Image (spheres, helix red, strand yellow):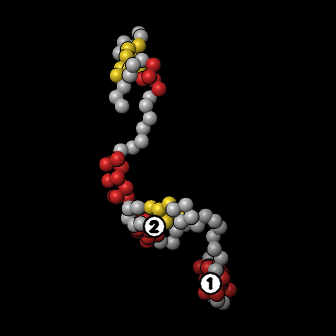
């Protein structure tokens, strides 16, 4: 058995030893099918975050034809905090002199609640 094993091993080894590097390189040129894994996900994530931070922290044109620009997010937050967000009055409060109906705690009826605007 040992002699047969050595014979078969040497025969296969001689057959495959012709040029294994060439067959490996031939296989290496083919790309796997889509979707492929990222080659360097940490670096790609770092680059993505750097690009997003650059966009969020700088001025730039959104649409030059319409005159739409972007401003740094910190400045935008300060402007919204000073001016406040736009709002419209609730139509529910117009019918009941500024009150709206909500379910009562006991769920047996409704009660009125003052709407703050």
Residue at the (41%, 13%) spot, across then down: 110
Give the quarter of the figure containing the N terminus.
bottom right
Q: Nearer the viewer, residue 2 or 68?
A: 68
The quadrant in which the C terminus is found is top left
The secondary structure type at the circle numbered 1 is helix
For numbered disc 2, what is the local secondary structure?
Answer: strand
What residue is shown at x 31% (from left), y 48% (from top)? 82
List the residue tagged with mark 2.
Answer: 60
Mark 2 → mark 1, Cα distance in angstroms? 47 Å
Figure label count: 2
**Of discs 2 and 1, which sits in the foreground?**
2
Mark 1 and mark 2 in contact (Cβ < 8 Å)?
no
Q: Characterize the local packing of mark 2: few (<14), some (14-19) or many (20 or more) Cα atoms within 10 angstroms.
A: some
Horizontal arrangement in the rendering, residue 33 relative to residue 46 (left or right):
right
Task: Determine which residue is flagged by label 1.
Answer: 25
Q: Quadrant of residue 23?
A: bottom right
Asked whether the viewer can see residue 102, the reply is: no
Q: Mark 2 or mark 1: which comes first in sequence?
A: 1
Give the image location of residue 37, x and y in percent. Answer: 54, 66
- Identify the residue at image location x=37%, y=16%: 112
């Amino acid at each position: 058995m040992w002699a047969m094993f050595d014979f078969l091993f040497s025969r296969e080894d001689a057959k495959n030893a012709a040029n294994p590097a060439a067959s490996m390189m031939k296989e290496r040129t083919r790309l796997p099918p889509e979707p492929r894994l990222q080659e360097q996900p940490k670096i790609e994530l770092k680059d993505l975050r750097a690009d997003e931070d650059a966009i969020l922290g700088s001025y730039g044109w959104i649409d030059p034809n319409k005159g739409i620009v972007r401003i740094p997010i910190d400045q935008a937050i300060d402007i919204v905090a000073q001016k406040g967000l736009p709002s419209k009055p609730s139509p529910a409060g117009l019918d009941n002199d500024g009150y709206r109906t909500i379910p009562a705690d006991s769920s047996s009826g409704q009660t009125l609640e003052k709407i703050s605007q």
